[in-house]
Image (spheres, grey):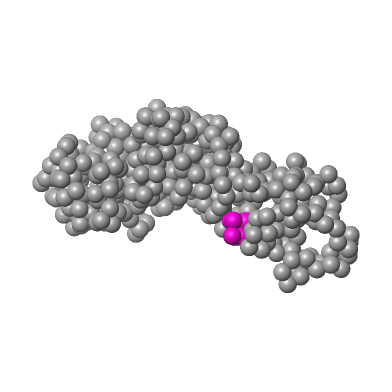
Amino acid sequence: MKTWVEISGQRLAANYRLLAATAGAETTVFAVVKADAYGHGVDLCAPVLSAAGAGWLGVTDPDEGMAVRAALQNSGIEQPRVLVMSEMLDEEADEMVEHHLTPVVSNIRQMESLARAAGQRPSSPFPIHLEIDTGMARQGVPVGDALDTVLRWLSSQSVIRLEGMMTHFASAEIAGSHQTSAQRRLFEQTIHQIHSAGLQPAWIHAGNSSTVDNPAGEPLHWLEQLARSLNARAMVRTGLALYGYSLPVEREQDYAGDAQSLVQPGLEPVMTWKARVTGVREVEAGTRIGYNGTFTAQRHMRLALLPVGYADGLRRELSSTNGRAGGWVLFGQARAPIVGRVSMNLTIVDITGLPAVAVGDEAVLLGEGITAEDHAHLAGTIAYEILCGVRAVRCLR
């Protein structure tokens, strides 16, 4: 292979166990494997996470859910629960029921579709998780008349069972966040409203990796207490941290507490992206390199060609000019700066001073000292987008 990604199963499992230990015994850590496990390969990651103790896996849609089911079956691993986290289309109801996927719902139309599908396969009531929109205006049933209508519908039938209640925090990475506090209050009011309607969810969940990482601990402790008061189980949905990264913890302007990450120091990136050198050449001063000659050699240079570019997910913003440094790759511990523009499938790096580098040698593009955050800083984006954008054959190591 000319370019490939290595996934460390050992690091992935260790990251999950760290998150579970930090969350504590009262909170279940839910592993998010949507978007092909954040670009890491769901067929590789789902079995590792399940074997590490994850009893719940989160996907985007039924197709991802079925891919997870297949990966686990092929690995001979006991099937965890699979939650489809994005709102479903009506025509997806049959797949949800047939493949025992648990949907997140936000309105009666979705629940009616599921009730019709579940009614054709008589069994125990089909479980759903109801999302409450507490302030993101994205998914979830709005608090008010719409929620009242949903609760009346749920209370009046037996084909569908309300198994879980959830919301999502918009600013979980901010210690002492006023927005999170407002969302918590609204969610708590809603939970009590649901309880008063005679409904008893078994799971109460909210937040993401930053909810575990937040040093204030407030959202996590609040979630545990809320679940305990309803005789339910608390759950937090971790994604990015599983793969070795977390958002930096910020501090609300008037917050005086600690703002040091709880898990970030112990996380290890799971993905290592590599490419093999396909060409080596020497150029003299004055040689223009790459498209539009945006980089001109100022001295004799030795260059290596890598068979990877923006079509593979190596961001074009990692390009360099004589006036602007770009990204770099590693040969062992030695940096080789990218020179000129990253093109569609080819990138040139400077190996002057690295005479041992030859055709066939491995260069590290990401991982082992180069982070997704390094790439994101140069590309003006976030680590999530870098990881999800990598396109290469993946293997477990």
Q: Is residue 314 magenta?
A: yes
Magenta segment? 310-315
- 73 vs 120, left or right, is right
Evaluate whether residue 51 shows in this view. Answer: yes
Q: How many marks?
A: 0
Q: Residue furthest bottom?
A: 292
The x, y position of residue 151, in whole percent, is: 17, 49
Evaluate whether residue 211 shows in this view. Answer: no
Going 42% across and 34% down the picture, which residue do you hit? 74
Going 30% across and 39% down the picture, which residue do you hit? 204
254 or 189, which is in the foreground? 189
Going 80% across and 46% down the picture, which residue do you hit? 357
Q: Residue furthest left?
A: 156
Q: Is residue 378 magenta?
A: no
The x, y position of residue 81, in whole percent, is: 33, 37
312 or 218, which is in the foreground? 312
User: What is the quadrant of the C terminus in the image?
Assistant: top right
- 176 vs 141, left or right, is right
- 305 vs 58, left or right, is right
319 or 210, which is in the foreground? 319
- 98 vs 326, left or right, is left
Going 71% across and 44% down the picture, which residue do you hit? 362
| In this view, 58 is above or below 308 | above
The x, y position of residue 241, in whole percent, is: 51, 41
The x, y position of residue 196, in whole percent, is: 16, 42
